[in-house]
Amino acid sequence: MGSDANVAKAAVKGAENRIIGLDGLRGLMTLFVVASHYFGEVRHGVAAMEVGWLAVKMFFALSGFLVGRLILERMTCENFFVVFYVRRFCRTLPVYFFCVLLVYFCMHLLGSPQWMDIGNEFPLWSYLTFTQNFFMISTDSIGPRWLAPTWTLSVEEQFYIFAPLLFVLVPRRGLPYFLGGAAVLALLFRVAAFEGGLFTPMTALCMLPGNADSLFAGMFAAVLYKTEAIDWRRWEIGLRIAPVAALVATAIIQILGHGTGAWVSSLGFFLVSIGCAAFVLAIARGTAEARHFQSPILCFFGNTSYSVYLTHLTVLGLLHGLVFGARPDIETAGQIALTFAALPVAFFVGWVFTKIVEEPITAYGRTWRWSRTRRGAAIAAVATPRAS
């Protein structure tokens, strides 16, 4: 009973620090991803529905913001590194391992028929070690379709490894310059790939260096959020306009590039990353848009987003494969109806996994409390001679 009470208290404590609007934003982006995969990125899909790339950029900016904010608030705690990594482990890894193992079990149980769209099957250990993006580069493929979204999680997990060190090693005053410079380097990395041919396009798209601008832009927003000297009334309009301006500029780049997409994938993604970070900061600051993202419906999708993200392609693929013996598509009325039927199934599966796997272990992770003793305080106390 005592341990259960501690878990419950930790869950309440964690909820107190949440910015509800960001949960709703995450929920909307989850709907973007599902819509893109179900109705856009299929053989006869609708091009206008292919908005998953935008959601991925927003997810990265959100992660950078939330992790940056957490580090800034807790980095002085004596047990910072232990608690940070334990909480990250409990939050992201168990349900991820559970879903990956479940998908592999389904693939081998069904005998890997053609409708599963496996393509190049990467070894299981690559997913369990978050190194599948290296296999994506070596094979120039996304691997098994049902696990394709996991490349973004490998980028984030690799980012989490060194993110705390940046804030510890870089002086607070120099953080904005460092983060801004690192974001520009990510842009140059993609330019070197798409325009200079120094790296393959897959390297630029699925590896951490090619996506770091979104993550660092989110961290930059966190630094601004925690800076008390800023007069936000002067900057509110700019925060609200920046996301729209970034999308318009990206559309113009697409038109000027005659649809090649190379400059969209380099400069366009950079501008969108800035726009996403600005939008996250605007929601966190409580601008007029924020209240729309506090909707209970969007927050529901936001709270179940991780498990839905991991399983929605498996649900769609299984239903189309078992019913029609083919890959998902929306060419016929039957396929369209089945795709729509897959939506509640995907969200229900995600909700169940959230409740039985993700939330209990996340709540346990929050029982690892932040120390009130500041880092270096104990050493300083020992090093300081006492008066005799």
Image (cartoon, grey):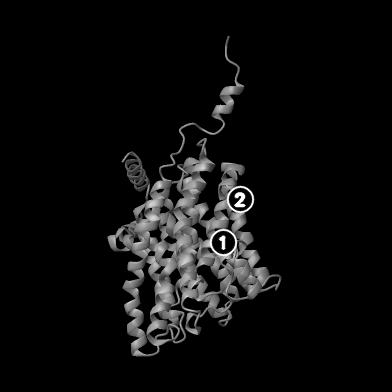
Q: Classify 59 as above or below 262.
A: above
Could you tell me if residue 285 is visible in this image?
Answer: no
Q: Classify 268 as above or below 371.
A: below
User: Is 182 on the left-hand or right-hand side of 280?
Assistant: right
Identify the mark at residue 54; answer none if there is no mark. none
Count the labels in the image: 2
Provide the residue designation for mark 1. 130
Q: Classify 283 as above or below 204.
A: above
Q: Considering the numbered disc 2 on the image, is that residue within a helix, a strand or a loop?
A: helix
Furthest residue toward bottom = 332
What's the amino acid at mark 2? Phe
Q: Nearer the viewer, mark 1 or mark 2?
A: 1
- Front residue (pair 241, 300): 300
Question: Going 41% across and 60% down the picture, which residue do you hit?
Answer: 240
- Front residue (pair 70, 161): 161
Question: Going 45% across and 84% down the picture, which residue do you hit?
Answer: 327
User: Is 247 on the left-hand or right-hand side of 346?
Assistant: right
Could you tell me if residue 253 is visible in this image?
Answer: yes
Q: Dot 1 surroundings within 10 Å: few (below 14), some, or many (20 or more)? A: some
Instruction: Return the x and y of residue 314 as percentages of the image width and height.
Output: 43, 73
What's the amino acid at mark 1? Phe
User: Is 281 on the left-hand or right-hand side of 375?
Assistant: left
Task: Indicate which disc, 1 or 2, sits on the residue closer to the N terminus.
Answer: 1
- Front residue (pair 139, 236): 139
Identify the mark at residue 178; answer none if there is no mark. 2
- Front residue (pair 232, 221): 221
